[in-house]
Amino acid sequence: MATTQSSGLLGRRQQAAQNDGIILEAAREVFLADPKAPVSAVAKRAGVGISALYRRYPGKEDLLRHLCHEGLRRYNAEAEAALEEEDAGRAFTGFVERVVDADVHSLTVHLAGTFTPTAEMGADALRSNELATTLVDRAKEVGALREDAVPQDIGLTLEACAAIRVDDPARTRQLRRRVLAMLLRTLSAPSDPPLPGPPPQPGELSGRWKPA
């Protein structure tokens, strides 16, 4: 009897996890197309009842927070994996390519300022800055990045790629990789002449996360 109950509980948990994945994917599609869309549009896209969605996410802000936090965690996981690689130059390039393919920064471009971040998100954001700094410093040490590049340039590069979107997902990926390759060549070029203007400063772009 206990085995049957345990199997049933495991099955329900697996189903709940599957449903959550469907809801989050639907939310991503809906809110990237229209950040002002109602939660009901997410439920319709996911093919679930609105009550089922609200059981997981009590409100739209909760759903947006979870969606963006998942993206931040993905960024950190990719950065930590890159730091395990011995070749610092290849690690940096592979990292930004994977994050571009994961489309993490489309969430930043479209959803910043639409919800109040949690303290946990703030801590993970600080961690992402630390990881980016380490990746940039390592790449500079081996001559894979120009000396006047700064960690914040990674975010600007990723957001520039995220802004590219066409109807065909495969073509979107191709165009983003093309632009990324051009941007990486600029970042890996010699520092003479220097990049124009003062570089982005730590925290300069974080103000956009404050709800309007």
Image (spheres, rainbow, N blue to C red):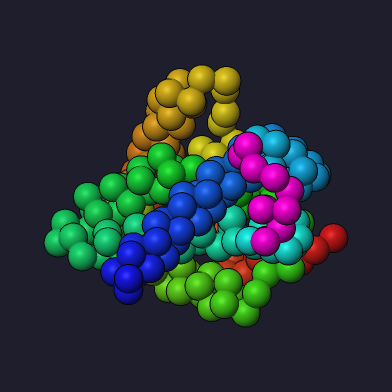
User: Which quadrant holds the N terminus?
Assistant: bottom left
Horizontal and vertical percent for residue 212?
A: 85, 60
- Quadrant location of residue 44? top right
Which residue appears farthest toward the left when viewing the image? Answer: 86
In the rendered image, residue 5, in percent from the top left (x then y), is placed at: 38, 68
Residue 95 visible from this viewpoint? yes
Q: Which residues are magenta?
A: 46-55
The residue nearer to you, when weighing 128 against 42, is 42
Q: Nearer the viewer, residue 15 or 117?
A: 15
Residue 120, image quadrant? bottom right
Does residue 140 appear left or right of residue 179 in this picture? left
Q: Residue at x 64, y 43 (%)?
A: 48
Above or below: residue 54 compared with residue 3: above
The answer to whether residue 31 of the structure is visible from this angle is: no
Instruction: Locate residue 28 relative to residue 15 in the image: left or right.
Output: right
Which residue is pictured at 45% across the width and 21% down the height? 171
User: On screen, 78 above or below 133?
Assistant: above
The residue furthest front is 1
In magenta stretch: residue 193:
no
Prevailing secondary structure of the magenta residues: helix
Q: Is residue 52 magenta?
A: yes
- Seen from the viewer's position, the closer of residues 47 and 147 is 47
Residue found 49% across the figure and 43% down from its top: 103
Q: Give the number of callouts.
A: 0
Decide if residue 25 is on the left or right side of residue 76.
Answer: right
Look at the picture and state if 2 lies above or below 36: below
* Residue 207 percent coordinates (x, y): 72, 66
In this rendered view, identify the residue nearer to me: 72 or 184. 72
Farthest residue to the right: give it.
212
